[in-house]
Amino acid sequence: MSEAAAELVAQQLAEKPASILCFPSGDSPTGMLNYIVQWANDGKIDLSQSHFIALDEWVGMDENDEGSCSYYFKHHFFSKLNKSFKSITLFNARADNLDAECERINSFISSKGGLDIMMVGIGMNGHLGLNEPGTPVDLYAHHSALDPVTVQVGQKYFNKETALTGGITLGLQHLAEAGKAVLIASGAKKADIIHESLQGTITIEVPASILQTLSNAFILLDQDAASGLEHGS
């Protein structure tokens, strides 16, 4: 699964060296990022003309907060690359004006002609990025309150109980407009929500169900995450 995801990135870079790439943080993409680091450092892929954009961030946190998305990328990805991207764009989730911060991100993506790859994981409640249940599908970058499930599950990224007050994230409209919308998910714990998202009712209460409507979607699962899918559907 991780290698297949990295291969998609490698193919994209071969076709368009100046690609705009969006990756999530967390458990699911770690293997993929390790492949990208290895291939970049070995000279098999070239990141130097491409642009990196982070998918989301906890409101009020930055790269100094262990458990934040920015911290994850700094320590598990950027620091391992011998040669980095042409540009790296992270949400400033400590900004006084989060609406203006969302507009900054939207404007940057628009100025580059849109995302070539937008990769997302999936939450236990079906969220993509921090597009929580009930989020309209036509939003670009936005900030919002977190679903209780996200607050609970999000504690796994922190060493102690941490108040998670909000999220700032790329929107589902970005996913719909990306050259490739890629879902990557692993583990048996994701099997039920994968089934509900990919073979259940399309509804904003399960944000990942939008993937059923997208012609640009790639679904990359390990065997455990795919174990709940009905064959032939």
Image: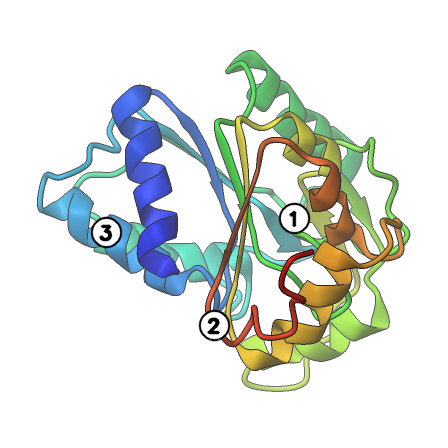
Instruction: Judge depth for marks 1 and 3 and give the one in front.
Output: 3
Label ID, residue 223? 2
Report the amino acid beneath label 2.
Gln
> Which quarter of the figure has residue 217?
top right
Whole-angstrom CA distance, mark 3 to mark 2, is: 24 Å
The spot of residue 227 in percent (x, y) is 58, 75
State the residue at coordinates (77%, 64%).
196
One can see residue 97 in this view? no
Instruction: Judge depth for marks 1 and 2 and give the one in front.
Output: 2
Instruction: In the rendered view, tell whether residue 119 sits above or below residue 12.
Output: below
The spot of residue 11 in percent (x, y) is 30, 33
State the residue at coordinates (55%, 55%).
62
Q: Find disc 3 in the rendering and name its residue.
A: 37
Whole-angstrom CA distance, mark 1 to mark 3, is: 26 Å
Q: Give the residue furthest to the front.
A: 232
Q: Find disc 1 in the rendering and name its residue.
A: 93
Whole-angstrom CA distance, mark 1 to mark 2, is: 35 Å
The spot of residue 192 in percent (x, y) is 71, 74
In the foreground, 41 or 155? 41
Quadrant occupied by the N terminus: bottom left
